Image (cartoon, helix red, strand yellow):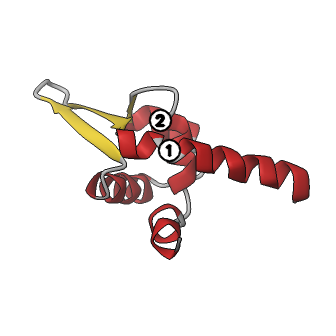
Amino acid sequence: MARTAAVIGSKWTLLIIRDLVTGTKRFNELEKSLTGISAKTLSERLRSLDQEGILTRRAFAEIPPRVEYSLTEKGRALVTLIESMREYGQRWL
């Protein structure tokens, strides 16, 4: 339980996962959706989630460069946990 909390407990992480549930997103799409997040923080969170195997980063050799992010199977498995947390918050907080 502590290991899971360490992976998803950082600020913005759950919201990034929430946004990727609907499909592949580019950096700028995530940045627009996450009002208040800095580009540096978003980059750090995406890098961390990629290292944990929660999402995949796909870079395209284009001008301008294009990078897309999507959830892995491991990342999609977190959706039920996130949904349970949302339901708890709605009911009790």
Give the camera-side residue of 52 and 34.
52
Give the camera-side residue of 81 and 17.
81
Q: Image point 41% across, 35% down: which residue?
A: 28
Is 4 on the left-hand or right-hand side of 69?
Answer: right
Residue 67 in picture, x, y percent from top left? 26, 34
| Label 2 residue SS | helix
Is 16 on the left-hand or right-hand side of 74?
Answer: right
Residue 23 in picture, x, y percent from top left? 45, 26
Residue 22 in picture, x, y percent from top left? 52, 27
**Residue reaching furthest to the left:** 61
Dots 1, 2 in contact, CB < 8 A = yes
**Residue reaching furthest to the bottom:** 2
Q: Within 10 angstroms of label 1, few (less than 14), some, or many (20 or more) residues?
A: many
Image quarter where the C terminus lies is bottom right
Residue 48 in picture, x, y percent from top left? 34, 60
- The amino acid on which the numbered mark 2 sits, given as a three-letter code, is Leu
Q: Image point 48% across, 55% down: which residue?
A: 38
Q: Which residue is mark 2?
A: 20
Is 90 on the left-hand or right-hand side of 39?
Answer: right
* Residue 87 shows in this picture: yes
| Label 1 residue SS | helix
Q: Which residue is mark 1?
A: 17
Which quadrant of the structure image shows residue 79?
Answer: top right
Q: Within 10 angstroms of label 2, few (less than 14), some, or many (20 or more) residues?
A: many
16 shown above or below 44: above
